[in-house]
Amino acid sequence: MEFDGDSAEENGDGVAALRKETKENCDGCSAIGAEFAPDREFARQNGVEGDPSFVSSSEVEKLAGIGSWLPSLENCRIARLSFNAYKKLPYGGHSFSICRSKSEIEESRNFELRLDKLLETEKNKIIELVKVQKDGTVEVDVTKNEPMASELLEFDAADTQHIGVGEGAIEFHKSIPRLKIAMLVVGTRGDVQPFIAIARRLQDFGHKVRLATHANFKAFVESADIDFYPLGGDARVLAGYMARNKGFLPSGPADIALQRKQIRAIIDSLFPACTEPDPDSGSPFRAQAIIANPPAYGHVHVAEALGVPIHIIFTMPWTPTQEFPHPLARVHQTAGYRLSYLVVDLLIWWFIRDIVNDFRRRMKLSPIAYFSTYHGSISHLPTSYIWSPHLVPKPNDWGSQVDVSGFCFMNHSLNYQPQKEFLEWILSGAKPIYIGFGSMPLEDAERTTSIILEALNCTGQRGIIDRGWGGLGKFPEISDNVFILEECPHDWLFPQCFAVVHHGGAGTTATGLKAGCPTTVIPFFGDQFFWGDRVHEKGVGPAPIPISELSVERLSNAINFMLDPEVKIRALELAKAIGSEDGVAEAVNSFHRHLPPELPLPAIASEETGNPVQSIILTMEKWWYLPCIS
């Protein structure tokens, strides 16, 4: 796929300054996969050929603990890359300024240089701290090398001082221009759904919103009257990979090529998603702001190339904190909680670094170093986390760049009409227990169905089994106390249920808690374990049961836990608190609040509409500002 390199060239002095700095300080981009040869010519052109600082493949093999399959990382050099050049970034032919003190810049440079000059033995000490488990999660053990853990945390503290695109947010901005906003969302239906709610609210403010996500969700997005653009990657393939590996990192060689192919397809589609005309109508589009979730790796690089602000929105924690570990990490010591975010960032960055740098080269951007304060971290970007602060309060060590906005719900139940047979079944007895795993794949759907049926029988409960993508409910004989459901909006269904059992997706968890349902989480991977722990900590559900450990006994005990009247009371109290929030409004306010203080709009050329008069009208509309932001 070819990119319009001229678009980056037109961005002016800001990007030129960034290129100059990265040319002086970045390493040549070498390959992760064995099929990619190190780009020594590019390293030579960028003035870093012969740099003795590098991390060898053997070191990374030690890091993984399963080095026989990990791809080669030969010639991956260490060099610093900072956001100093972002002091002045172009925006539509104009510039906005971001202030940063000289002392902050110097302090960050000192830490970067210290990391650059790490001796080989010191690099090995970093590797001692972490190990990739066979299930794809990351184990962090600070006791392996406490001095090095402290050093990395000190480096992390300096890294968080960097100010990236969008920082220096407007606190007293009276008006916001109407913008063309590209939303870049990677994940399952549950990941996409809250962005649809936010997109609709942004459109109410007069913004033009394009939601770019997997082709699987085209009809879902367009049904909400939102423009759709297809991103690469298949949501079903990604979900299957995550379920097998319990997270982002591959647990064996078979999945490496598959995951890298998916990631490359996603990253390669991001720039067109922000710049290409509408695939159906042909209407021109060029993003003036980007909203993305972290798995849309490459989002910040597109923002850099276009010179536009970016805002991160996510359903699970990705910003370092000392209050709980990264959802993809196992940490046995609280002292390692914050460190786990740095480790996961680095591991993911090392896995996709060559893909990202190849993408950057095609956009005429300089490559990024092996060890870099830039890598995969979002700490320097304005971020909104869309969960309820009543469930997970904002950590004390998150600064003003980070907001916890509240859950973002869509009201699917307005136009939903349940089938007569289903409605009659619901009304024929006590409120049932819902059991379903959404888009999660199942290795043995029949065995899982058998466990569910026996647990419902043991506890004397009626149950709704949702087939989902895993194909639950395929069983020779089903009792009249059980209803097999094909499809039903959760915001209508869950209020009809006494309690819910599900995979722990953020959206499903939110909907169940809003309905006042005690909740049992059966996590498959990723943040599902995090939400299961949070539900249990609040006393509205039992400890999560990993899908691999699901049994009749454990599920029966979980159902009995949820039947406790005290648990139901706590669930109803939490539901009342969540019901008082407007997470969508807060997320939109957060986006507006963190926009740069100067946001001039580019002129609209007559070619964009084909009609000079229409262009003038559109220009006037673009300069018509939105209402005051409180």
Image: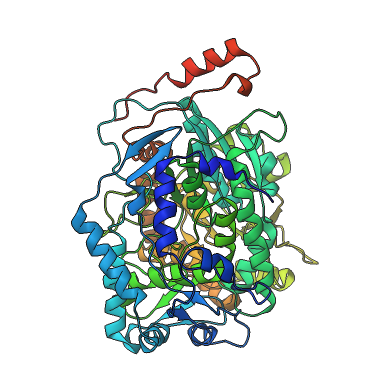
Query: In the image, 325: left or right of 289?
Result: left
Residue 307 higher or lower than 178, as above or below: below
Say whether residue 521 is visible: no
Taking the spot 70% from the left edge, 57% from the top edge, the residue there is: 467
Q: Position of residue 271 (x, y in %)?
A: 59, 46
Q: Position of residue 372 (x, y in %)?
A: 40, 66
Q: Which part of the image, by quadrant, shows the C terminus?
A: top left
Taking the spot 63% from the left edge, 53% from the top edge, the residue there is: 268
Instruction: Give the quadrant of residue 346.
Output: bottom left
User: Depth check: 616 or 578 in front?
Assistant: 616
Taking the spot 48% from the left edge, 44% from the top edge, the residue there is: 291
User: Depth check: 209 or 165 in front?
Assistant: 165
Question: Outermost residue, left direction?
Answer: 103
Residue 297 higher or lower than 609, as above or below: below
Say whether residue 536 is visible: yes
Question: Outermost residue, right direction?
Answer: 476
Q: Position of residue 433 (x, y in %)?
A: 57, 58
Q: Position of residue 60 (x, y in %)?
A: 51, 82
Query: In the image, 280: left or right of 310?
Result: right
